[in-house]
Each structure stands twice: as structure tokens, then as C-alpha cells.
Amino acid sequence: MPALSLFELAKKRLIKSIDLLNDVGDLPYHFLESILRFVQNPGQMQELEENCPQLRGETGDIWLKFIKRDIPNWEQKPHEPRDPKNWGKVYRKLKKEAEEEKKADAEALKQQFRAIQDDRAQNKTSIFSTRTHYGERPKQLAIPFSGRIGPPPKTGKVALDKLRKTMFNIKVERPKVQQLSDYVLAQRVTKIKAAPARMVRMAEHEASSSKVSPSAPVARSTEPRPIPKQPVITRRPVPQKTSPPPPRPSLPAGQQFHAPKPQPSSESAASTAPKRKRQDYSVFHQPKRRRM
């Protein structure tokens, strides 16, 4: 797929941010027709025509779209201007008339509703009771007061009984699997009618990848193999005869070699003299000093 041109990229960006467009410079209408058709606000179109006069008289289709969208019964009203540059004025005039008609209809509806309420109030029937209370008011019966108002307090036993009853009802409503018959269990078993959409997409993706992947090794196998640089050995080399090692020098028969013994020097004799042994310190017995 070839790359998009600069015009197509700019066009997509303008359509995406069409609400921010308020000026197009001196570009002609036929160059921007596919972009201006995405304008949804009549005020924005009026601002564009004021900033760019070359667009006046060319945007009749866009204004007609606004009239069809915002003006009720537009086909029964004159909506085509004599001058093509006055499409904006026609739209604003029809919009003002439509708002006035809407307000008049709302006021007429209020008047009708008010008249209905007045008529209903006039035709309302009043019911009066024939009982009259003359003289002393009858005394109320005395109710004994026990010192407590309201229902009796709940104890722990009542709450425990209620919990037991609830657990019993749950067990009765939901029987265990062992208590159900084989016929009921067979009816409850559901069968898979169709695989999930996600699994189908994953299977299709794996199938497509498995079809494409083997092509790579096939393409590689057709390429010629590189020639090895090392020589190929076809036969074993013939062993060559080596010369014997030179004879080792030795003394004549009957003679022996005697190395001279090294004599110790004065420094080495002083260093090798035995040191005086130091007497160990004893706690129990102190040696006596000899008098000189």
C-alpha cells in the first residue's frame, strides 16, 4: 500500500479537529469542499465566511443541510435566497421564526392547561359530613399504661431460631445432587452449541500463522550453501621416518662425579648457634638467684 500524500494527511487531521477550524486563508472552496462538509455548527460556518470572503456563494449545500436539520417544516417556507451569498441570512431568519413559533406553541399549551384546571375546579364536587359535634366532647377511653412502649425486645433465641429456619428453607429449595433423579440431571446438562467468538478468532489466527511460517525455512533451503574454507581430507597422510635422538653425554666407565660440600661461613655459624632456653614461669615455685 503506497504512503499517503501530504494533502491526505493534512485532510485527515483537519477533519479530526474540525471544531477548531475558523480560517482557511485564500484557499478556494473546491479545494476544501470535502473538509467543510464536516462542519456541524452554523456559527462556525458564518465565522469562516467572514474571515474568508471567497467562500461566500459556494456553501449553499452546507447551509441547506443546516436548514433541513434545524428548521421544522422547512419545505413549506421560502428558503432559497435571491443572492447565493445570503444563505447564512436565510438560515438565521428561519431559525428565529422557528424559535418564536416554539415559544408561541408553549404559551398556547400553558393557556389550555390553565383553562382545564379552572374548569376542573369549577366542576369539583364538595362532600360534607352530616355529623355535628355540639356540646361537650366525648371522653376518650383510658388505656392502661404498663411502662413499656413498642414490641417486646428480641432475645438471642429468637435470632437463632430464625437463622435455623432460613437454613432449612434453603436446603429444601435447593436439594443436593444426590437427591435428584437421573432424568432431572440429564435435563440440566447443557450442550455446547457454538464455540466462543474469542476461541474462533484465536484458532483462525493460529491457522494463518501456521500456513505462513513454513515458507521461511523453504526459502532458506533453496539458497546455495557456502563453500567451506578448510580443505577436505580424502586420505590419511603417509608416516615419515624420524631421525633417532642424539646420544646423552655420560662419564667414562669406572669414574664417579663428586660434588664439593659447601663450608659454613662465620655469619651462618652465628645464626645457627643454639639459643638459650628461657625458663618457664611457675606460680608455685620461684627459682633462687645464685650469688656471683
Image (cartoon, rainbow, N blue to C red):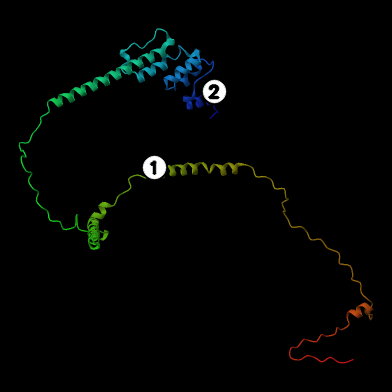
Above or below: residue 96 compared with residue 159:
above
**Residue positioned 42% across, 17% down in the render:** 62
Residue 106, given in percent of the width and then of the height, sits at 27, 21
Q: Which residue is mark 2?
A: 7
For this rendering, which residue is in front, 209 or 241? 209
List the single residue furthest toward the top: 82
Q: Nearer the viewer, residue 19 or 133?
A: 133
- Classify mark 2: residues with Cα within 10 Å, few (<14), some (14-19) or many (20+): few
Please name whichever residue, 33 or 101, is drawn nearer the observer in this view of the structure: 101
Identify residue type, mark 2: Phe
Image coordinates for residue 276, horizontal then vertical, percent: 85, 85
Q: Is residue 267 left or right of residue 164?
A: right
The residue tagged with tag 1: helix, strand or loop?
A: helix
Residue drawn at point x = 42 percent, y = 11 percent: 86
Q: Is residue 270 visible?
A: yes
Q: Does the rendering let one see residue 257?
A: no
Q: Please give left or right for residue 49 compared with residue 64 in the image.
A: right
**Which label sits in the foreground, 1 or 2?**
2
- The three-letter code of the residue at mark 1 reads Ala
Can you tell which mark lies on residue 197? Answer: 1
Q: Earlier in the sequence, mark 1 or mark 2?
A: 2
